Image (cartoon, rainbow, N blue to C red):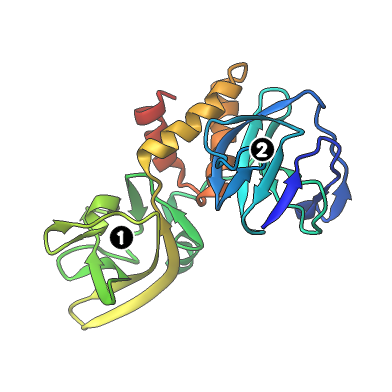
Amino acid sequence: MKTLLLSGLAAIGILATGFVATYTPPAADNYTVIKVDGKITYVKNGKDLITGDLFATNEKLKFATQESRAAVISSISGRFVLTPDPKGGEAANLLPAMSNVATRSGALINALDLKNHFSDNYLLLDEMELKINSEVYPMNNNNFFYLQYELNGEVIPKKLDFTEDRLELTASEIFTIDGKAQPIPASKEMSLYYRDNVNKKSTKISEFTLVVPNTASLKVELEVILGELKSKDDEQIRSEITAYMYEFYGKPQKENLEDWLTKNMSL
């Protein structure tokens, strides 16, 4: 366990751009916690840092591991990722968060499109539809897509529903086995297959990690972002939310995210 001091004077290495820059947040600025991955506690009282907490730049914090991190935001300075200083010492890092992140494309034309689409951390917000090229991948009683994953030591094949040329992914259905709804895990490693029953052949398309956020928790997190971005327009807010979702959950599919935000956040 390392005790670190969040300092407004900490120099920040911006790894993604390939150079080192220095950022100095306003000394009097406070940050609101959006989400915590892992465990971070306050040195002063031992309590956990949680969503909605407001803390000052001089707050002493203890990170359980080097992987512990938090998304934080300020109406003055913007959104940052709070991480422990890899070199130790008395300062935590406030790393500039991702911005201007593109969503996953909606047009799936060929096998490569499918493989690229279903990759890495695949974010599913409740349910979505994906348009599939029916000439390459016809979907009917004999031809269909299915997912495969392990649960309690058992391999589970799960046929995906479809309507004409639209593939349907519904979190609750994916984790319903023999008619019984199972708890939906926050993340689950999966494989996507295409089945040709006529030729008795299954073709593996890709492997990915399905990420399904808890709706209630996600709404609270996004309310924090909205509260700090009151002066921004809807386009800027959606862009900020998209970048946050990518950084802490997985790359969202555009229509899925837009539908979810309209339904749950009135955006």
Quadrant placement of the C terminus: top left
Q: Which residue is mark 2?
A: 44
Left or right for 128, reference 123: left
Looking at the image, is mark 2 or mark 1 nearer the viewer? 2
Q: Residue at x 57, y 40 (%)?
A: 49
Left or right placement of residue 8 versus residue 136 in this view: right
**Rendered position, 20 above or below 254:** below
Q: Residues within 10 Å of mark 1 (few under 14, many from 20)?
A: some
The x, y position of residue 262, in whole percent, is 39, 28
Tell me if I can see residue 206 in this picture.
yes
**Element type where label 2 sits in the image:** loop
Q: Secondary structure at mark 1?
A: loop
Q: Position of residue 78 (x, y in %)?
A: 69, 30
Q: Amino acid at mark 1?
A: Ser
* Identity of the residue furthest to the top in this view: 231
Disc 2 and disc 1 in contact, CB within 8 angstroms:
no
Q: Disc number at residue 234?
A: none
Judge from the rendering whether residue 28 lies leftward or rightward of residue 160; answer left or right.
right
102 or 198: which is nearer to us?
102
Given the image, on which type of amino acid does mark 2 rest?
Lys
Residue farthest toward the left in the current orientation of the protein: 179
Taking the spot 48% from the left edge, 63% from the top edge, the residue there is 119
Q: Is residue 247 above or below residue 7?
A: below
Task: Please tell me which residue is depicted at 67% across the width and 23% down the height of the picture.
Answer: 75
Q: Nearer the viewer, residue 13 or 111?
A: 13
What residue is rendered at 21% in x and 83% in y?
Answer: 200
Mark with earlier residue (2, 1): 2
Image side of residue 152 versus residue 239, left or right: left
Which labelled disc corresponds to residue 134? 1
- Count of labels shown? 2
